[in-house]
Image: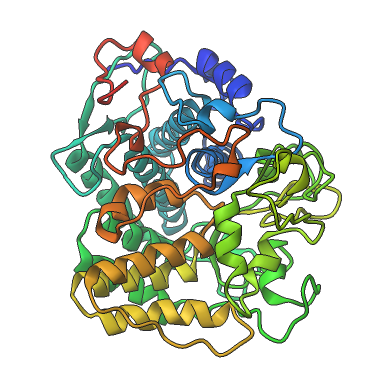
Amino acid sequence: MKKIKILFTIALALVLTASCDDAINIIQDGELPMDLKTEADLEQYLKGQIYINLDVSNDIAFTSVFTDEVSIGVDNGGQDVGLHRFFLNQSDGYAAGIWINNYTVINGVNRLLDQAVKIPETPKSKSILAEARVLRAFSYFQLLSYFSTDMSNDSALGVMLLDFVPELNTKLPRVSNGEIYALIESDLEFANENFVDLPVANANRYKYVNKDMINALYARMFLYRKKYDLAKEYALKVKNESGLTLTIVKDTPVNATNNPYKRMWADTQRGEVIFALSRPQEGTWGNIASAFYFNTTNATGGAYLEMGRNLFNLLNSIPGDKRVSEFVDITKVLDPDYDTRVDYIAKDIIPINKYPGKGSQPLRNDLKIFRLSEIYFILAECAIAENDLSTAASYIGDVKTARNDNPVATPVYATPTAAYAGLIDERRLELCFEGFRYLDLKRLGNLAGRAIDRNPTDDQIKSLPTTLSNGDYRFTLPIPQSEVSGNPTIQQNPGY
């Protein structure tokens, strides 16, 4: 049997020391209960060994630090300063975390499929396998998004194709994007044929694979591949069949507990979430806001990273837009002279509050993977590709309207470049701190005439570069050093 050399112990140590995410649960071979005999065993393994390892915390933290979403915070003691200054190499802990975490999920799914052949096939067992294969497809898509130089090119170099249970020392080369996409599509097709969804009335349905999540994954995948007709088809399925509507923020005071948008982020209401990774208040789960804070999500809570000044300025410049009050804690300290003050780091404090915590866990929230606003943006991007700029403007305007207390005029775009600029600008505001900005600039930056956009005060040294060329090699992550060292067949990405 072929074997794969993913150095779990080394990589885990690397992630725990270099990344802010301390909850990555890498499962060693000997710890896996591999004598599955019943449907119940399959289901328990799916929830206890696969869902539990699915995580996008590294994706969110890396994107926030490397792009223009954060600034160095008032309590920063060196955390992520190097990466924030665009120092990215094969020893980066976030890159290792993304790589290892996704292959851990993939390996878990492969083990489940391997064990399932011993169990009589029933509609329920096939549905369990379908659910697992969707999670494998998602993990492979995440890997391609970060480690392939061009997600839209099927011939470009992708990642390692692992669709079997490996032995310890197997070494696999990377294969083309097309080969990975073929496996992803095969997994999703199997799910379409065999997955039995939870009842719509089930309050926790969106925290597991569901039909709308499958369609949303199809839509995002085809969008990144520039297969706009298919992306549009699946995005419309979500929009028209999910029963969800854009979560509004109108007619509710700042920080009010009955604000639907705030309740969505605080995990007390589903809102427009299509699929989220559950992070319950109880148990030893990861805390997403620990990517920015030591203690609590406010100005005195140990903020070592804060909202980037230009991002805040954009949010704060839109009359009636409530996202600025939702994403920035009320304890903010704003200095009108921040750009000229010598001690601006201490005097201008913009605490991130997109993840406000829950109950006794002030840094913990569910990780929202797919939301309806993204579906509207997908439809807008497809419309731009079709040169239907008015339709694109309408979709973007719908999101703007849902986030504003005031009437919002539908934007008007005279050219595709202007439309792409409007799209990426709105994605920047709506999807900040959700892990999109890095990939958005990689995909759309040149089309929109946009790049990383930092304020000089985002760093402790004002003279440092505030942007990076969209064509820079660092818009593709390096294959982690642990993989390169243990796998001589692997090919590193250009520039590293």
Which residue is at the far front? 340
Residue 399 picture location, percent across and down = 49, 77
Location of residue 459 with respect to 194 vertically, above or below: above
Q: Quadrant of residue 218?
A: bottom left
Residue 440 picture location, percent across and down = 37, 53
Relative to residue 305, is residue 167 drawn left or right? Answer: left
* Viewer-side residue, 135 vs 457: 457
Q: Is residue 285 visible?
A: no
Relative to residue 256, is residue 124 drawn left or right? Answer: left
Give the number of marks: 0
Q: Is residue 149 visible?
A: yes
Which residue is at the far left? 155
Q: Quadrant of residue 305?
A: top right
Residue 368 picture location, percent across and down = 57, 57
Colouring: rainbow
**Which residue is found at the position 51% from the left and 18% from the top?**
11
Relative to residue 47, is residue 331 drawn left or right? Answer: right
* Viewer-side residue, 309 vs 447: 309
Relative to residue 152, is residue 112 drawn left or right? Answer: right
**Which residue is found at the position 18% from the left and 42% from the top?**
178
Q: Quadrant of residue 51?
A: top right
* Viewer-side residue, 209 vs 464: 464
